[in-house]
Image (cartoon, rainbow, N blue to C red):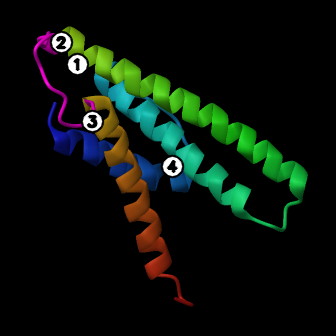
Amino acid sequence: MKVSEITGLQEQRTVAWHEAGPASTEQGLLGLVELNHLENFLLWHEEDIARRDDLGPERVVQAKRRIDGHNQRRNDLIEKMDQHFVRELKPRTSGCSFNSETPGMMIDRLSILALKHYHMNEEANRADA
């Protein structure tokens, strides 16, 4: 799988989910990537709700609990992506230094960057910006 497939999926889903609501359709590793991006997408919007001061404390508490759930599922999906890479690539498990995040963490970071890109573009193109 190419990085461009991952980033393309994340960018496409970000746009589509803002228009029609989120859903997951992919299988295999791409399915894990998509589910991870879905958790980040939902997390992003719950964090927006948690920052609002016009919804009352009960809704903010609810958002904080949802954020915790999205973060747990996000971390579980990062682990599943890493397990996929270990199964498929069969890397050496000893004598190797760690110089970076895991592949799952890097894919998660690409997801967050796709969301930042979309929302920064949205803000920059507002009529009142």
Q: Which residue is mark 4?
A: 17
> Which residue is tagged 1?
85
Q: Amino acid at mark 4?
A: Trp
Given the image, on which type of amino acid does mark 3 rest?
A: Glu
Q: Which mark is residue 88?
A: 2
- The residue tagged 3 is 101
Q: Is residue 8 visible?
A: yes
> Magenta region, mostly helix, strand or loop?
loop
| Magenta stretch holds residue 91 | yes
Residue at left 75%, top 65%?
Answer: 52
Quarter of the image containing the N terminus? top left
Q: Is residue 92 left or right of residue 20?
A: left
28 displayed left or right of 64: left
Segment colored magenta: 89-102
C-alpha span from label 2 to label 3: 18 Å
In the rendered structure, are the residues bearing label 1 and label 2 in contact, judged by CB atoms less than 8 Å apart? yes
**In this rendering, does residue 21 appear at all?**
no
What SS does tag 3 mark?
A: loop
On whether residue 69 falls in the magenta region, the answer is no
Residue type at the position of mark 2 = Glu
Foreground mark, 4 or 2, reads 2
**Point 64% across, 53% down: residue:** 47
